[in-house]
Image (cartoon, helix red, strand yellow):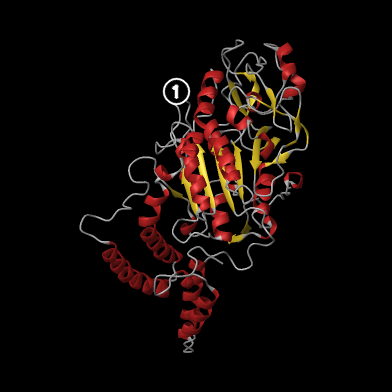
Amino acid sequence: MHPFFEHQLDLTRRQFFNSAALNFGGVAVGMLAAQSNLLAAAPSKPPVEMMHKPLTGFPHHKPTAKAVIYLHMNGAPSQLDTWDYKPQLEKHFDEDLPASIRNNQRITTMTSGQARFPVAPSKFKFTQKGKCGRWVNAELLPFTAEVVDELAVVKTVHTNAINHDPACTFVMTGSEVPGKPSIGSWLSYGLGSESNDLPAFVVFTPVFPEGSNGQAIFSRMWGSGFLPSSYNGVALRGSGDPVLYVRNPEGVTGEDRRTMLDALNKLNRRGLEKYRDPEIATRISQYEMAFRMQSSVPELTDVAKEPKHILDMYGPNVDKPGTFAHSALLARRLVERGVRVVQVLHRGWDQHSNLPTQLGNQCKDTDQATGALIKDLKQRGLLDDVLVVWGGEFGRTVYSQGKLTKDVYGRDHHPRNFTMWLAGGGIKGGMELGKTDDFSYNIVERPVHLNDLNATILHAMGIDHNRFAFKFQGLDQKLTGVEGATVVKELLA
Protein backbone atom coordinates (compact mmCIF):
# COMPACT_ATOMS: atom_id res chain seq x y z
CA MET A 1 0.00 0.00 0.00
CA HIS A 2 1.15 3.56 -0.70
CA PRO A 3 2.63 5.06 2.53
CA PHE A 4 0.39 8.13 2.32
CA PHE A 5 -2.72 5.95 2.38
CA GLU A 6 -1.19 3.91 5.19
CA HIS A 7 -0.94 7.15 7.10
CA GLN A 8 -4.62 7.92 6.54
CA LEU A 9 -5.58 4.47 7.80
CA ASP A 10 -3.28 4.96 10.74
CA LEU A 11 -5.15 8.11 11.73
CA THR A 12 -8.41 6.19 11.68
CA ARG A 13 -6.98 3.45 13.88
CA ARG A 14 -5.70 5.95 16.41
CA GLN A 15 -9.07 7.64 16.59
CA PHE A 16 -10.64 4.28 17.35
CA PHE A 17 -8.07 3.27 19.95
CA ASN A 18 -8.15 6.65 21.66
CA SER A 19 -11.93 6.50 21.94
CA ALA A 20 -11.55 3.04 23.48
CA ALA A 21 -8.91 4.35 25.90
CA LEU A 22 -6.44 1.72 24.70
CA ASN A 23 -3.85 4.15 23.35
CA PHE A 24 -2.39 1.72 20.84
CA GLY A 25 -1.89 4.38 18.19
CA GLY A 26 1.82 4.69 18.86
CA VAL A 27 2.24 0.92 18.52
CA ALA A 28 0.46 0.95 15.16
CA VAL A 29 2.67 3.77 13.93
CA GLY A 30 5.78 1.92 15.02
CA MET A 31 4.70 -1.26 13.25
CA LEU A 32 4.00 0.63 10.05
CA ALA A 33 7.32 2.44 10.25
CA ALA A 34 9.13 -0.87 10.57
CA GLN A 35 7.46 -2.07 7.38
CA SER A 36 8.37 1.02 5.41
CA ASN A 37 11.73 1.74 3.85
CA LEU A 38 11.00 5.45 3.67
CA LEU A 39 12.75 6.25 6.93
CA ALA A 40 15.80 4.37 5.70
CA ALA A 41 15.95 6.91 2.90
CA ALA A 42 16.39 9.69 5.46
CA PRO A 43 19.46 8.87 7.58
CA SER A 44 20.53 11.21 10.36
CA LYS A 45 23.95 11.74 8.76
CA PRO A 46 25.13 11.97 5.15
CA PRO A 47 24.88 8.35 3.97
CA VAL A 48 27.95 6.33 3.15
CA GLU A 49 25.83 3.50 1.77
CA MET A 50 24.06 3.36 -1.59
CA MET A 51 22.04 6.45 -2.45
CA HIS A 52 19.77 4.50 -4.80
CA LYS A 53 19.00 1.14 -3.23
CA PRO A 54 17.30 -1.68 -5.13
CA LEU A 55 14.11 -3.22 -3.83
CA THR A 56 14.54 -6.29 -1.66
CA GLY A 57 14.84 -9.37 -3.83
CA PHE A 58 15.87 -7.48 -6.96
CA PRO A 59 17.03 -8.42 -9.50
CA HIS A 60 14.87 -11.53 -9.85
CA HIS A 61 17.46 -13.34 -11.93
CA LYS A 62 20.98 -12.75 -13.20
CA PRO A 63 20.82 -9.76 -15.55
CA THR A 64 22.54 -9.54 -18.90
CA ALA A 65 22.46 -5.73 -18.76
CA LYS A 66 23.20 -3.32 -15.93
CA ALA A 67 22.10 -0.11 -17.65
CA VAL A 68 19.85 1.10 -20.48
CA ILE A 69 20.40 3.89 -23.00
CA TYR A 70 17.10 4.54 -24.75
CA LEU A 71 17.32 6.58 -27.98
CA HIS A 72 13.78 7.69 -28.76
CA MET A 73 13.22 9.26 -32.17
CA ASN A 74 10.11 11.27 -31.32
CA GLY A 75 7.74 11.64 -34.27
CA ALA A 76 8.13 8.16 -35.81
CA PRO A 77 10.92 7.31 -38.29
CA SER A 78 9.75 5.80 -41.55
CA GLN A 79 10.58 2.09 -41.51
CA LEU A 80 10.21 2.04 -45.31
CA ASP A 81 13.05 4.53 -45.71
CA THR A 82 15.40 3.16 -43.08
CA TRP A 83 15.23 -0.59 -42.35
CA ASP A 84 12.26 -2.34 -44.03
CA TYR A 85 13.57 -2.79 -47.56
CA LYS A 86 10.81 -3.23 -50.16
CA PRO A 87 12.40 -3.10 -53.66
CA GLN A 88 9.27 -4.50 -55.35
CA LEU A 89 7.40 -1.26 -54.55
CA GLU A 90 9.07 0.43 -57.53
CA LYS A 91 6.66 -1.29 -59.90
CA HIS A 92 3.70 0.00 -57.86
CA PHE A 93 4.71 3.67 -57.91
CA ASP A 94 1.63 5.94 -57.79
CA GLU A 95 -0.76 2.99 -57.87
CA ASP A 96 -3.53 2.95 -55.28
CA LEU A 97 -2.80 0.84 -52.26
CA PRO A 98 -4.86 -2.35 -52.74
CA ALA A 99 -8.00 -2.44 -50.62
CA SER A 100 -7.06 -5.98 -49.57
CA ILE A 101 -3.90 -4.58 -47.95
CA ARG A 102 -5.49 -1.62 -46.26
CA ASN A 103 -8.47 -3.77 -45.21
CA ASN A 104 -10.49 -0.82 -43.87
CA GLN A 105 -7.99 -0.29 -41.08
CA ARG A 106 -8.10 2.85 -39.03
CA ILE A 107 -6.24 5.84 -40.51
CA THR A 108 -5.76 9.37 -39.24
CA THR A 109 -7.90 12.38 -40.14
CA MET A 110 -4.88 13.82 -41.93
CA THR A 111 -5.28 11.39 -44.83
CA SER A 112 -8.80 9.98 -44.39
CA GLY A 113 -10.13 12.66 -46.73
CA GLN A 114 -7.72 11.87 -49.57
CA ALA A 115 -9.34 10.71 -52.79
CA ARG A 116 -6.44 8.30 -53.37
CA PHE A 117 -3.80 6.40 -51.40
CA PRO A 118 -0.93 6.27 -53.92
CA VAL A 119 2.00 3.98 -53.17
CA ALA A 120 5.28 5.85 -52.55
CA PRO A 121 8.41 3.67 -52.83
CA SER A 122 11.46 4.88 -50.96
CA LYS A 123 13.72 7.04 -53.10
CA PHE A 124 16.80 5.88 -51.18
CA LYS A 125 19.26 3.17 -52.06
CA PHE A 126 19.45 0.26 -49.65
CA THR A 127 22.67 -1.73 -49.24
CA GLN A 128 23.57 -4.98 -47.52
CA LYS A 129 26.00 -4.28 -44.71
CA GLY A 130 27.99 -6.24 -42.14
CA LYS A 131 28.71 -9.93 -41.91
CA CYS A 132 24.99 -10.44 -41.33
CA GLY A 133 24.15 -8.88 -44.71
CA ARG A 134 21.58 -6.52 -43.23
CA TRP A 135 19.63 -4.40 -45.72
CA VAL A 136 19.81 -0.80 -44.53
CA ASN A 137 19.46 2.66 -46.01
CA ALA A 138 23.18 3.39 -46.02
CA GLU A 139 22.59 6.73 -47.72
CA LEU A 140 20.88 8.14 -44.65
CA LEU A 141 22.42 5.87 -42.00
CA PRO A 142 26.03 5.29 -43.09
CA PHE A 143 27.41 5.22 -39.53
CA THR A 144 24.72 3.02 -38.05
CA ALA A 145 25.21 0.74 -41.07
CA GLU A 146 28.77 0.14 -39.86
CA VAL A 147 27.54 -1.47 -36.63
CA VAL A 148 24.68 -3.64 -37.93
CA ASP A 149 26.43 -6.78 -36.68
CA GLU A 150 25.78 -5.51 -33.13
CA LEU A 151 22.07 -4.81 -33.73
CA ALA A 152 18.96 -6.92 -33.39
CA VAL A 153 16.53 -5.31 -35.84
CA VAL A 154 12.85 -5.92 -35.08
CA LYS A 155 10.64 -5.12 -38.07
CA THR A 156 7.27 -6.04 -36.59
CA VAL A 157 6.85 -3.83 -33.55
CA HIS A 158 3.25 -2.63 -33.25
CA THR A 159 1.23 -0.42 -30.94
CA ASN A 160 -2.35 0.52 -30.13
CA ALA A 161 -2.06 4.29 -30.57
CA ILE A 162 -2.22 6.22 -33.84
CA ASN A 163 -1.48 9.78 -32.65
CA HIS A 164 1.78 11.09 -31.24
CA ASP A 165 1.01 12.00 -27.65
CA PRO A 166 -0.78 8.78 -26.65
CA ALA A 167 1.68 6.73 -28.70
CA CYS A 168 4.74 8.30 -27.06
CA THR A 169 3.12 7.91 -23.66
CA PHE A 170 2.48 4.24 -24.48
CA VAL A 171 6.07 3.63 -25.60
CA MET A 172 7.48 4.97 -22.36
CA THR A 173 4.84 3.93 -19.82
CA GLY A 174 2.97 0.97 -21.29
CA SER A 175 -0.29 2.94 -21.28
CA GLU A 176 -1.90 5.61 -23.44
CA VAL A 177 -3.40 7.14 -20.30
CA PRO A 178 -1.11 9.68 -18.60
CA GLY A 179 -0.16 9.13 -14.99
CA LYS A 180 1.77 5.87 -15.22
CA PRO A 181 5.52 5.62 -14.47
CA SER A 182 7.99 5.67 -17.34
CA ILE A 183 10.23 2.69 -18.01
CA GLY A 184 13.19 4.61 -16.59
CA SER A 185 11.30 5.26 -13.38
CA TRP A 186 10.29 1.62 -13.09
CA LEU A 187 13.91 0.51 -13.53
CA SER A 188 15.35 3.01 -11.07
CA TYR A 189 12.60 2.09 -8.57
CA GLY A 190 13.32 -1.63 -8.81
CA LEU A 191 17.07 -1.70 -9.30
CA GLY A 192 18.33 1.58 -7.88
CA SER A 193 21.70 2.69 -9.19
CA GLU A 194 25.39 2.07 -8.62
CA SER A 195 26.12 5.80 -8.69
CA ASN A 196 26.15 7.70 -5.41
CA ASP A 197 26.80 11.09 -6.96
CA LEU A 198 24.42 11.17 -9.91
CA PRO A 199 20.69 10.44 -10.37
CA ALA A 200 19.64 6.89 -11.20
CA PHE A 201 17.68 8.11 -14.24
CA VAL A 202 18.85 10.94 -16.50
CA VAL A 203 17.10 12.47 -19.52
CA PHE A 204 18.24 14.57 -22.48
CA THR A 205 15.98 16.41 -24.94
CA PRO A 206 18.47 17.66 -27.55
CA VAL A 207 17.78 20.27 -30.19
CA PHE A 208 16.66 19.13 -33.63
CA PRO A 209 17.07 20.54 -37.16
CA GLU A 210 15.20 23.68 -38.15
CA GLY A 211 12.28 23.06 -40.46
CA SER A 212 11.38 19.79 -38.75
CA ASN A 213 7.87 19.04 -37.60
CA GLY A 214 8.75 18.87 -33.91
CA GLN A 215 5.92 17.45 -31.85
CA ALA A 216 5.40 18.62 -28.28
CA ILE A 217 7.10 16.48 -25.69
CA PHE A 218 5.89 16.06 -22.14
CA SER A 219 7.73 15.36 -18.90
CA ARG A 220 5.47 12.36 -18.23
CA MET A 221 7.71 10.46 -20.66
CA TRP A 222 10.30 10.44 -17.90
CA GLY A 223 7.89 10.94 -15.00
CA SER A 224 7.41 8.59 -12.05
CA GLY A 225 3.59 8.58 -12.21
CA PHE A 226 2.21 6.98 -9.07
CA LEU A 227 5.68 5.96 -7.86
CA PRO A 228 7.35 8.33 -5.39
CA SER A 229 8.60 11.40 -7.23
CA SER A 230 12.20 10.57 -6.31
CA TYR A 231 12.07 8.19 -9.29
CA ASN A 232 11.43 10.97 -11.80
CA GLY A 233 14.04 11.26 -14.51
CA VAL A 234 16.39 14.21 -14.03
CA ALA A 235 16.54 16.28 -17.22
CA LEU A 236 19.95 17.81 -17.92
CA ARG A 237 19.66 21.08 -19.80
CA GLY A 238 21.40 21.78 -23.08
CA SER A 239 22.16 25.45 -22.40
CA GLY A 240 23.50 27.29 -19.39
CA ASP A 241 24.15 25.16 -16.33
CA PRO A 242 23.13 21.51 -16.95
CA VAL A 243 21.13 21.71 -13.71
CA LEU A 244 19.61 24.95 -12.44
CA TYR A 245 21.33 26.34 -9.33
CA VAL A 246 23.99 23.62 -9.40
CA ARG A 247 26.51 26.30 -8.43
CA ASN A 248 26.61 27.87 -5.01
CA PRO A 249 25.85 31.61 -4.84
CA GLU A 250 28.82 33.91 -4.52
CA GLY A 251 30.15 33.82 -0.96
CA VAL A 252 28.67 30.40 -0.12
CA THR A 253 31.18 27.57 0.26
CA GLY A 254 30.62 23.84 0.04
CA GLU A 255 31.02 23.61 3.82
CA ASP A 256 28.33 26.28 4.27
CA ARG A 257 25.99 24.32 2.00
CA ARG A 258 26.66 21.08 3.91
CA THR A 259 25.83 22.75 7.23
CA MET A 260 22.62 24.25 5.84
CA LEU A 261 21.59 20.91 4.33
CA ASP A 262 22.18 19.00 7.59
CA ALA A 263 20.02 21.47 9.50
CA LEU A 264 17.27 21.31 6.90
CA ASN A 265 17.34 17.52 6.88
CA LYS A 266 16.77 17.41 10.62
CA LEU A 267 13.59 19.43 10.18
CA ASN A 268 12.45 17.29 7.26
CA ARG A 269 13.06 14.07 9.20
CA ARG A 270 10.82 15.32 11.97
CA GLY A 271 8.11 15.98 9.41
CA LEU A 272 8.60 12.52 7.89
CA GLU A 273 8.33 10.81 11.27
CA LYS A 274 5.19 12.78 12.11
CA TYR A 275 3.28 12.76 8.80
CA ARG A 276 4.84 9.79 6.94
CA ASP A 277 4.39 11.64 3.67
CA PRO A 278 6.65 9.93 1.06
CA GLU A 279 7.23 13.29 -0.63
CA ILE A 280 9.18 14.40 2.45
CA ALA A 281 11.45 11.38 2.04
CA THR A 282 11.83 12.35 -1.61
CA ARG A 283 12.76 15.90 -0.62
CA ILE A 284 15.44 14.65 1.78
CA SER A 285 17.03 12.35 -0.80
CA GLN A 286 16.85 14.95 -3.57
CA TYR A 287 18.48 17.66 -1.45
CA GLU A 288 21.32 15.25 -0.71
CA MET A 289 21.63 14.28 -4.39
CA ALA A 290 21.61 17.95 -5.44
CA PHE A 291 24.52 18.59 -3.06
CA ARG A 292 26.50 15.73 -4.55
CA MET A 293 25.69 16.82 -8.10
CA GLN A 294 27.39 20.16 -7.45
CA SER A 295 30.69 18.35 -7.92
CA SER A 296 29.69 15.37 -10.07
CA VAL A 297 27.81 17.23 -12.84
CA PRO A 298 30.58 19.67 -13.83
CA GLU A 299 32.99 16.73 -14.05
CA LEU A 300 30.48 14.71 -16.06
CA THR A 301 29.85 17.43 -18.63
CA ASP A 302 33.52 18.32 -19.17
CA VAL A 303 33.92 16.39 -22.41
CA ALA A 304 37.10 18.29 -23.31
CA LYS A 305 39.04 15.64 -21.41
CA GLU A 306 37.89 12.96 -23.84
CA PRO A 307 40.55 11.80 -26.34
CA LYS A 308 40.41 13.61 -29.66
CA HIS A 309 39.72 10.42 -31.61
CA ILE A 310 36.63 9.82 -29.47
CA LEU A 311 35.34 13.35 -29.99
CA ASP A 312 35.97 13.05 -33.72
CA MET A 313 34.06 9.76 -33.80
CA TYR A 314 30.90 11.43 -32.41
CA GLY A 315 31.06 14.23 -34.97
CA PRO A 316 31.50 18.00 -35.17
CA ASN A 317 28.66 18.85 -32.76
CA VAL A 318 29.92 16.75 -29.87
CA ASP A 319 31.31 19.75 -27.96
CA LYS A 320 28.06 21.74 -28.29
CA PRO A 321 25.79 21.20 -25.26
CA GLY A 322 22.22 20.47 -26.24
CA THR A 323 23.04 18.59 -29.44
CA PHE A 324 22.30 14.92 -30.01
CA ALA A 325 26.00 14.15 -30.36
CA HIS A 326 26.81 15.80 -27.03
CA SER A 327 23.91 13.95 -25.39
CA ALA A 328 25.04 10.60 -26.80
CA LEU A 329 28.57 11.06 -25.45
CA LEU A 330 27.20 12.10 -22.05
CA ALA A 331 25.00 8.99 -22.10
CA ARG A 332 28.12 6.85 -22.34
CA ARG A 333 29.81 8.84 -19.58
CA LEU A 334 26.75 8.44 -17.36
CA VAL A 335 26.45 4.65 -17.63
CA GLU A 336 30.20 4.48 -17.16
CA ARG A 337 29.63 6.17 -13.78
CA GLY A 338 26.93 3.75 -12.70
CA VAL A 339 23.73 5.54 -13.77
CA ARG A 340 20.96 3.01 -14.40
CA VAL A 341 18.92 4.60 -17.22
CA VAL A 342 19.68 7.33 -19.75
CA GLN A 343 16.96 8.51 -22.11
CA VAL A 344 17.68 10.66 -25.17
CA LEU A 345 14.53 12.01 -26.84
CA HIS A 346 15.23 13.55 -30.24
CA ARG A 347 12.29 15.37 -31.81
CA GLY A 348 11.29 16.19 -35.38
CA TRP A 349 10.77 12.76 -36.99
CA ASP A 350 7.21 13.57 -38.13
CA GLN A 351 7.41 13.79 -41.92
CA HIS A 352 3.97 14.24 -43.47
CA SER A 353 5.39 16.05 -46.51
CA ASN A 354 8.77 16.27 -48.20
CA LEU A 355 9.93 13.26 -46.21
CA PRO A 356 13.21 12.68 -48.08
CA THR A 357 14.60 16.10 -47.16
CA GLN A 358 13.28 16.19 -43.60
CA LEU A 359 14.22 12.59 -42.81
CA GLY A 360 17.65 13.29 -44.27
CA ASN A 361 18.10 16.18 -41.87
CA GLN A 362 17.10 14.07 -38.88
CA CYS A 363 19.45 11.24 -39.83
CA LYS A 364 22.31 13.64 -40.44
CA ASP A 365 21.76 15.05 -36.96
CA THR A 366 21.79 11.66 -35.20
CA ASP A 367 23.38 8.90 -37.29
CA GLN A 368 27.07 9.56 -36.68
CA ALA A 369 26.68 9.86 -32.92
CA THR A 370 24.45 6.76 -32.79
CA GLY A 371 27.04 4.65 -34.59
CA ALA A 372 29.78 6.17 -32.45
CA LEU A 373 27.92 5.33 -29.24
CA ILE A 374 27.76 1.64 -30.16
CA LYS A 375 31.44 1.59 -31.14
CA ASP A 376 32.48 3.55 -28.07
CA LEU A 377 30.61 1.26 -25.69
CA LYS A 378 32.04 -1.82 -27.38
CA GLN A 379 35.67 -0.72 -27.37
CA ARG A 380 35.42 0.09 -23.66
CA GLY A 381 33.86 -3.28 -22.85
CA LEU A 382 30.62 -1.58 -21.81
CA LEU A 383 28.37 -2.94 -24.55
CA ASP A 384 28.28 -6.30 -22.79
CA ASP A 385 26.51 -4.64 -19.84
CA VAL A 386 24.65 -1.74 -21.47
CA LEU A 387 21.44 -2.25 -23.44
CA VAL A 388 20.86 0.32 -26.20
CA VAL A 389 17.35 0.72 -27.63
CA TRP A 390 16.48 2.79 -30.73
CA GLY A 391 13.03 3.53 -32.15
CA GLY A 392 9.99 5.78 -32.36
CA GLU A 393 6.35 5.57 -31.29
CA PHE A 394 4.93 4.08 -34.51
CA GLY A 395 5.76 3.77 -38.21
CA ARG A 396 4.82 5.43 -41.50
CA THR A 397 2.37 4.55 -44.27
CA VAL A 398 3.44 3.21 -47.64
CA TYR A 399 0.99 5.56 -49.30
CA SER A 400 1.87 9.19 -49.77
CA GLN A 401 0.31 12.06 -47.93
CA GLY A 402 0.09 15.11 -50.16
CA LYS A 403 2.21 15.62 -53.26
CA LEU A 404 3.82 12.52 -54.77
CA THR A 405 6.78 12.43 -57.13
CA LYS A 406 9.76 10.10 -57.31
CA ASP A 407 11.72 12.46 -55.06
CA VAL A 408 9.05 14.17 -52.97
CA TYR A 409 6.46 12.42 -50.82
CA GLY A 410 5.14 12.36 -47.28
CA ARG A 411 3.89 9.56 -45.06
CA ASP A 412 1.14 9.44 -42.44
CA HIS A 413 1.14 7.63 -39.07
CA HIS A 414 1.13 3.84 -39.16
CA PRO A 415 0.92 1.85 -35.88
CA ARG A 416 0.42 -1.58 -37.50
CA ASN A 417 4.15 -2.23 -37.91
CA PHE A 418 7.40 -0.35 -37.49
CA THR A 419 11.07 -1.03 -36.88
CA MET A 420 13.12 -0.75 -33.71
CA TRP A 421 16.53 -2.13 -32.84
CA LEU A 422 18.35 -3.22 -29.71
CA ALA A 423 22.06 -3.78 -29.08
CA GLY A 424 24.33 -4.97 -26.28
CA GLY A 425 23.30 -6.13 -22.83
CA GLY A 426 22.70 -9.78 -23.74
CA ILE A 427 20.96 -9.09 -27.06
CA LYS A 428 21.84 -11.25 -30.06
CA GLY A 429 23.58 -9.00 -32.56
CA GLY A 430 23.42 -9.25 -36.35
CA MET A 431 19.89 -10.64 -36.39
CA GLU A 432 16.55 -9.61 -37.86
CA LEU A 433 13.18 -10.54 -36.41
CA GLY A 434 9.76 -10.43 -38.04
CA LYS A 435 8.46 -9.88 -41.54
CA THR A 436 5.95 -7.49 -43.06
CA ASP A 437 3.92 -7.77 -46.26
CA ASP A 438 5.12 -6.39 -49.61
CA PHE A 439 3.80 -2.94 -48.71
CA SER A 440 5.16 -2.80 -45.12
CA TYR A 441 1.54 -2.36 -44.05
CA ASN A 442 0.74 -5.56 -42.15
CA ILE A 443 2.72 -8.10 -40.17
CA VAL A 444 2.98 -11.55 -41.71
CA GLU A 445 5.53 -13.14 -39.39
CA ARG A 446 6.41 -12.78 -35.68
CA PRO A 447 4.57 -9.72 -34.34
CA VAL A 448 6.18 -7.95 -31.36
CA HIS A 449 3.94 -5.72 -29.27
CA LEU A 450 5.55 -2.80 -27.46
CA ASN A 451 4.67 -4.45 -24.15
CA ASP A 452 6.58 -7.54 -25.33
CA LEU A 453 9.57 -5.32 -26.05
CA ASN A 454 9.35 -3.71 -22.61
CA ALA A 455 9.09 -7.15 -21.03
CA THR A 456 12.28 -8.09 -22.87
CA ILE A 457 14.09 -4.97 -21.67
CA LEU A 458 13.07 -5.75 -18.09
CA HIS A 459 14.21 -9.36 -18.54
CA ALA A 460 17.64 -8.24 -19.74
CA MET A 461 17.87 -6.08 -16.61
CA GLY A 462 17.12 -9.09 -14.41
CA ILE A 463 13.43 -8.39 -13.79
CA ASP A 464 10.47 -10.72 -14.28
CA HIS A 465 7.82 -8.30 -15.55
CA ASN A 466 5.04 -10.50 -14.16
CA ARG A 467 6.44 -10.08 -10.63
CA PHE A 468 7.18 -6.36 -10.90
CA ALA A 469 4.11 -4.47 -9.70
CA PHE A 470 3.08 -1.51 -7.56
CA LYS A 471 -0.23 -1.36 -5.77
CA PHE A 472 -2.19 1.71 -6.90
CA GLN A 473 -5.92 2.40 -6.94
CA GLY A 474 -6.58 -1.16 -5.86
CA LEU A 475 -4.65 -2.71 -8.75
CA ASP A 476 -1.25 -4.32 -9.11
CA GLN A 477 0.05 -1.91 -11.73
CA LYS A 478 2.78 -3.09 -14.14
CA LEU A 479 4.82 -1.53 -16.92
CA THR A 480 3.67 -4.30 -19.25
CA GLY A 481 -0.03 -3.86 -18.47
CA VAL A 482 -2.71 -6.36 -17.50
CA GLU A 483 -3.36 -8.07 -20.84
CA GLY A 484 -0.22 -10.17 -20.76
CA ALA A 485 3.16 -9.71 -22.42
CA THR A 486 5.87 -12.13 -23.48
CA VAL A 487 9.64 -11.84 -23.41
CA VAL A 488 10.95 -12.00 -26.98
CA LYS A 489 13.40 -14.84 -26.43
CA GLU A 490 14.64 -14.82 -30.02
CA LEU A 491 16.39 -11.52 -29.24
CA LEU A 492 18.40 -12.94 -26.35
CA ALA A 493 21.95 -14.13 -26.94
Q: Above or below — where is 487 with respect to 71?
A: below
Q: Quadrant of residue 141?
A: top right
As drawn, which residue projects farthest toward the bottom?
21
Q: Nearer the viewer, residue 255 or 174?
A: 255
Quadrant, the N terminus: bottom right
Q: Above or below — where is 2 with respect to 104?
A: below
As drawn, which residue projects farthest toward the right?
445
Could you say where residue 75 lies in the image, as x and y percent from the top left?
Answer: 54, 32
Residue type of the residue flagged with mark 1 = Gly
Could you say where residue 175 lies in the image, as x and y percent from the top left?
Answer: 60, 46
Q: Is residue 198 left or right of residue 415?
A: left
Q: Above or below — where is 307 with respect to 85?
A: below
Instruction: Find disc 1 in the rendering and name its residue.
Output: 211
**What residue is at 26 percent from the left and 65 percent from the top?**
256
Q: Above or below — where is 265 with respect to 289?
A: below
Q: Residue 151, can we see it?
A: no
As helix, strand or loop, the secondary structure at mark 1 comes to loop
Total tally of numbered discs in the picture: 1
Q: Is residue 149 left or right of residue 203?
A: right
**What residue is at 20 percent from the left and 58 percent from the top?**
251
Q: Is residue 46 left or right of residue 413?
A: left
**What residue is at 50 percent from the left and 76 percent from the top?**
33
Could you say where residue 467 lies in the image, as x and y percent from the top left?
Answer: 68, 60
Q: Quadrant of residue 169?
A: top right
Q: Residue 4, can we see it?
A: yes
As drawn, which residue projects farthest toward the left?
251
Q: Nearer the viewer, residue 346 or 371?
A: 371
Could you say where residue 226 lies in the image, as x and y percent from the top left?
Answer: 52, 56
Q: Quadrant of residue 115?
A: top right
Label 1: few (<14), some or many (≥20) within 10 Å? few
